[in-house]
Amino acid sequence: MAKIELNGVGLTFTVHPHKRVSLKEYLVRGLFRRSVNPPLAVHALAGVNLKAGPGSRVGVIGHNGAGKSSLLRLLAGIYPPTAGDRVVEGRVCSLFDISLGFEPEATGWDNIAYRSYLQGETPATLKGKVDAIAAFTELGEFLNVPVRHYSAGMLMRLAFSIATTIDPEILLVDEVLAVGDLAFQQKAQARMKEMMASARLMVLVAHDLTTIRNMCNRVLWMEHGAVVKDGPPAEVIDAYVRSVKGPSAGVKAA
Amino acid sequence: MLSHVTAVWKFRHFLLALVRLDLRLRYRRSVLGIGWSLLNPIAMTIVFTVVFSGILGADAKKYAPFLLVGMAIWAFLRESAVAGSRALIANESYIRQSPLPYALYPLRTVLGQAIHFAIALAVGVALVVFLNGHLGNPEHGTGPLEVIGLIAPGLVLILIAAWAVATVFAFVNVYFQDTQHLLEVGSQILFFLTPIIYERSKLDGKDLGWVVDANPANLFMDLIRAPILHGEPPTLQLYLTAAGVTAGLVGLAAGTTAWLQKKVIFHL
């Protein structure tokens, strides 16, 4: 049974302005007071509580850098929480950076296999699904071509088709649907509605408020790593829009 | 640690598919294809044999297989460490997508290297059979099957040890990218401190035997090369020492993984 439970989850990590610390840097830091590459503490999430079960379609909205993507990565188990605890039960599938996690030199068919294995499929279980995945992508002959020749939209088609055909219990989507063309966006929305009907749990990050309004039955508004408002879509989205546009802007903008 | 290994097992299809892909890509658009895996050790062996049988006065018929097998073992250890140290950085895109066990990525490198190792070793064995007319040694009562049985534990141990070493360096390399360059230099030095191009007996007379005894790479030379060349069974003590060293390396890798697996993502 799909279940997400976050209790007072915080995520703090240190980053260095220059990407990596060299051995020299490490030694010098011990000898001299000031480092040219001092660590910066980033508070990505603070005190986040979230409980969601089957059938929940949670939309996450907020400014850039509000912690939305960190929240998804934490739910996916990629970031460990540095405070509080996280319980995620069920088969998780995540759609984050779509071009990531493809082997650029391998064909579309091969990448279908790799991604499916990554989600815990076996050659036996994949056999029955691979045609369905290929059909949903509508990529046809392009599946025989290495994916480095694909456009962003084509990669998204491939990633989305694999992620949803293998039937995850929890689907985490980060702002990727916007890349597809109109036809595929509609197809994707229909597929997601289908998945939700079978009581799947979904968490969706998007800046397109119409998508959130159409797809979700619950919305989290995040700011500075904390949940500002949590409730039914219309209410939270209106509050969010008002805060961005000023109180006079009203509801129509959404 | 056990849960880590079972998690790797769970994603074995993913792992093996990528190992196959790596193998295919490595020789993409080359005429010889996987033949390059064969050609490299053979060419090195020919050069060294010609040069050293002159300098050291070694018998070329004995020296060539000695060198070929030694180089195969060494190349596997070196590449596992050097290429393995880049495993986490190279697979960052997967790490950022799915919470797979980290040890899986060094294993991708090591298994890829193991295939080249197997090919080079097979050439070495073929050379021994070609030159001696047989594998094994009637004096020790060993035939071809016995030899394979004798080196099997060594092969398993070297694979595990290489995985462990690659895992440790893969983690360290995320924090200090200098590691991979240090490893290249270090392996160059170690190459000459390991009895690969010379017999160990050359050092014993000069009070340098301890250099070899302190070198774990030498354990695997004795464990794999000696049975292939001379059909001589390794002593039980040698097996146990190698198993102990491997266990130590596995412990180190498990400790490193446990220590850093929740932190490394923020440094990638």
Image: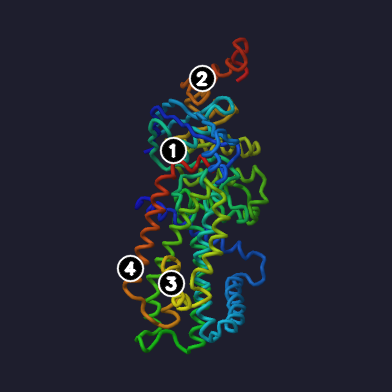
Above/below status of A204 relative to B233: above
Instruction: Give the distance between the C-alpha atoms of the residues marked 1 and 2, in whole angstroms.
Output: 28 Å
* Label 4 sits on residue: B240
Instruction: Give the distance between the C-alpha atoms of the residues marked 3 and 1, in whole angstroms.
Output: 48 Å
Instruction: Give the distance between the C-alpha atoms of the residues marked 2 and 3, in whole angstroms.
Output: 75 Å
Q: Residue at x 61, y 76 (%)?
A: B43
Q: In front of the other: label 3 or label 1?
A: 3
Q: Which colouring convention does the figure follow?
A: rainbow
* Label 2 sits on residue: A236
Instruction: Give the distance between the C-alpha atoms of the residues marked 3 and 4, in whole angstroms.
Output: 20 Å
Instruction: Give the distance between the C-alpha atoms of the residues marked 4 and 2, in whole angstroms.
Output: 66 Å
Tag 1: residue type?
Pro
Q: In front of the other: label 2 or label 3?
A: 3
Instruction: Give the distance between the C-alpha atoms of the residues marked 1 and 4, in whole angstroms.
Output: 39 Å
* Label 1 sits on residue: A80
Location of residue A25 in the rendering, given as x and y in whole percent from the top left corner: 57, 42
Of residues A172 and B193, which is closer to you in this image?
B193
Going from N to C along the chain, the mark reached first, 1 or 2, is: 1
* Numbered circle sitting on residue A183: none
Above/below status of B248 relative to A115: below
Tag 3: residue type?
Gly
